[in-house]
Image (cartoon, rainbow, N blue to C red):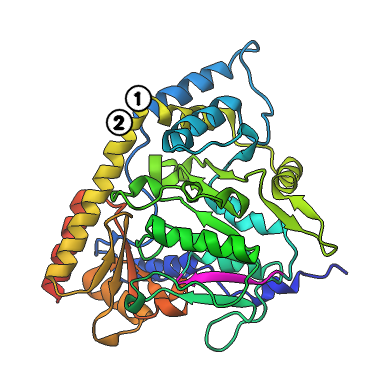
Amino acid sequence: MALVNEHYLKLPGNYLFSDIAKKINTFKVTHPGKRLIRLGIGDVTRPLPQACITAMHKAVDEMSTAETFHGYGPEQGYDFLIEAILKNDFASRGISLNPTEIFINDGAKSDTGNIGEVLRWDNSMGVTDPIYPVYIDSNVMCGRSGELGEDGKWSNVTYLPCTAENHFIPQIPDRRIDIIYLCYPNNPTGTTLTKTELKKWVDYALANDTLIFFDAAYEAYIREDDVPHSIYEIKGAKRCAIEFRSFSKTAGFTGVRCGYTVVPKELTAATLEGERVPVNKLWNRRQCTKFNGTSYITQRGAEAIYTAEGKAQVKATIDYYMENAHIMREGLQSAGFKVYGGVNAPYIWLKTPDNTGSWRFFEQLLYEVNVVGTPGVGFGPNGEGYLRLTAFGEREDCIEAMRRIRMWI
């Protein structure tokens, strides 16, 4: 008899966005004549940059002849994409990395969910609250998170509250934690850390032998000068941090799937006997065993992001979404809502009025305004009383949604 991994049974019945999809489908069946505006799930709507399309067409043609055909590629990624990443994302910011420290993947979600495999199940962990659900759920699956309490918190997780009172800047823990997840610009709140604030986390990690998982999926949306694009802008971070990057929201690769993870060779973790082991070596072994690499066609498309044409086209797309964020932020504020984010990230974090619960407010918007958001409590206990809206919609939909909300209020 095969026995299940009982940790999976601890997970809530559905993934947050599956719950939302079910509620939306129910609404569509019962209200077939209503036009929904979806500002909930963070999927993009603008087409791929033309530079990427051209590059992928060329790569497809290469696959059509024996002379230029590509079969299995390197699990770590092709050199041409890795070199483009090193030059444009890091060297341009004064950061020196080795090509073997870059691992191309099929999107940041996969690696943020899988990275815990190279670490013992009984490491303590800390997360900002609210937080992207994958961080918690992937650790529940291996037993690292402990047990779920009635307060919605897991017993082996240290929650670092991000609230309006602390300007959504988590407080440095007063005790040692083995692993800490940071996501900045933040999903879901849209807020950021300055270089000074991020340095405090690096200093804490170095002093406490803590490993930081730093999700920088939204770095391309940063507008303010004092907000770091990479944790490696902070001295010493290569000894304590793994960074995750994504092309999904940067260049519209949500349906194409490509990103990368940086695992510095300086970074080590310990055995029970105290031996220090390079995490880069462990992650490389994991990828070679469980991952066949991102497709050649996709990586050629990603490489094109770094051409002059690609950079201009990506910038235009990001500017489009950030103008949406500006429209939404201004519209909601004029309607009397308290909002956060939308300045360095494509997310708006909306305080619900009159202490309305997150799911209750979600349903009010859905049924009374026909606008879809994401309940803040789905991102953690401190998300209760908030709703996340994304700026990835069409411009006309963002404008219409704000009009509906103002009339509703």
Residue ID at (54%, 53%): 109
Percent x, y for residue 308?
35, 24
Quadrant in which residue 130 is drawn: bottom left
The N terminus, quarter of image? bottom right
Q: Residues within 10 Å of mark 1 (few under 14, many from 20)?
A: few
Classify the position of the C terminus by image quarter.
Answer: bottom left
Residue with the mark numbered 1 = 308
User: Residue 361 location, x and y as percent?
Assistant: 30, 78
Residue sitting at the far right: 1
Residue 124 within the magenta-colored segment of the rendering:
yes
Amino acid carrying label 1: it is: Ala
Query: In the current view of this chain or complex, which residue is farthest to the bottom?
Result: 150
- Dot 2 crowding, Cα within 10 Å, few <14, some 14–19, many 20+: some
Measuring from the top left, give residue 61's x and y in whole percent.
52, 17
In the displayed structure, 341 sits above or below 66; it is: below
Please give the name of the residue rendered at 32% of the width and 76% of the height, measured from the top-left corner. Answer: 164
| Res. 399 image quadrant | bottom left
Q: Which residues are magenta?
A: 123-130
Reply above or below: 142 against 234.
below
Magenta region, main secondary structure = strand
| Image position of 305 with respect to 213: above or below | above
Left or right of residue 371: residue 402: left
Determine contact: label 2, label 1, CB under 8 Å: yes
| Residue 159 shows up from this direction | yes
Q: Which mark, residue 134? A: none
Calculate the distance from the C-alpha at mark 2 to the C-alpha at mark 1: 6 Å
Tell me residue 119's x, y (percent): 72, 60
Residue under numbered circle 2: 312
In-front residue for pair 245/168 = 168
Image mark count = 2
Q: Is residue 22 magenta?
A: no
Res 186 seen here: no
